Image (spheres, rainbow, N blue to C red):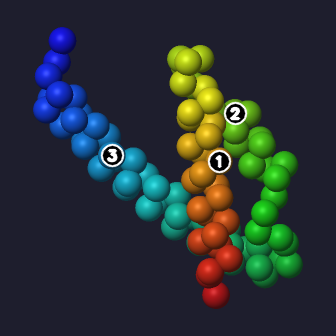
Amino acid sequence: MENLETLRSQIDALDAEISKLLERRLALVSNISKVKKTAGKAIYDPAREQEVIDKLPVENPEYAYPVADTFRDIMRHSRDFQDKQK
């Protein structure tokens, strides 16, 4: 069994990767916000959000709910971010 410090180090490395991916995602969200505003579309699209949740590639069924819930949070924060865009 690995020790706590080793496991936390692995989590820290994953967190750094996730942070970079979230920044890339938010850059795309910013572009989507501009397109939606130009087209007069609403920021919130529940059908699209459900589509994202439904197609998440989760290999371990035990993780399905927390992964889906995390993505719901990501999308909620993305909507908040879009609302604040000019």
* Image quadrant where one finds the N terminus: top left
Earlier sequence position, callout 2 versus callout 3? 3
Q: Which residue is mark 2?
A: 55
With 72 as the anchor, is 40 left or right in this view?
A: right
Q: Three-letter amino acid code at disc 2?
A: Lys
Q: Amino acid at mark 3?
A: Asp
Residue 3 % position (x, y): 14, 22
Quarter of the figure with residue 40 = bottom right
Q: What residue does disc 1 label? A: 72
Q: Identify the element where label 2 is drawn.
A: loop
Query: Which residue sits furthest front?
Result: 4
CA separation in Å, label 1 and label 2: 13 Å
Which residue in the structure is indicated by mark 3?
15
Quadrant where the image shows the C terminus: bottom right
Judged by depth in the image, the label closer to the viewer, 2 or 3, is 3
Marks 3 and 1, the one that precedes in the sequence: 3
User: What residue appears at the point 60 percent right and 51 percent down from the top-left corner?
Assistant: 73
Along the line of sight, which residue is nearer the eye, 58 or 63? 63
Which amino acid is tagged 1?
A: Arg
* SS of the residue under disc 3: helix
In the figure, is residue 59 to the left or right of 50? left
SS class, disc 1:
helix
Point out the residue furthest to the bottom here: 86
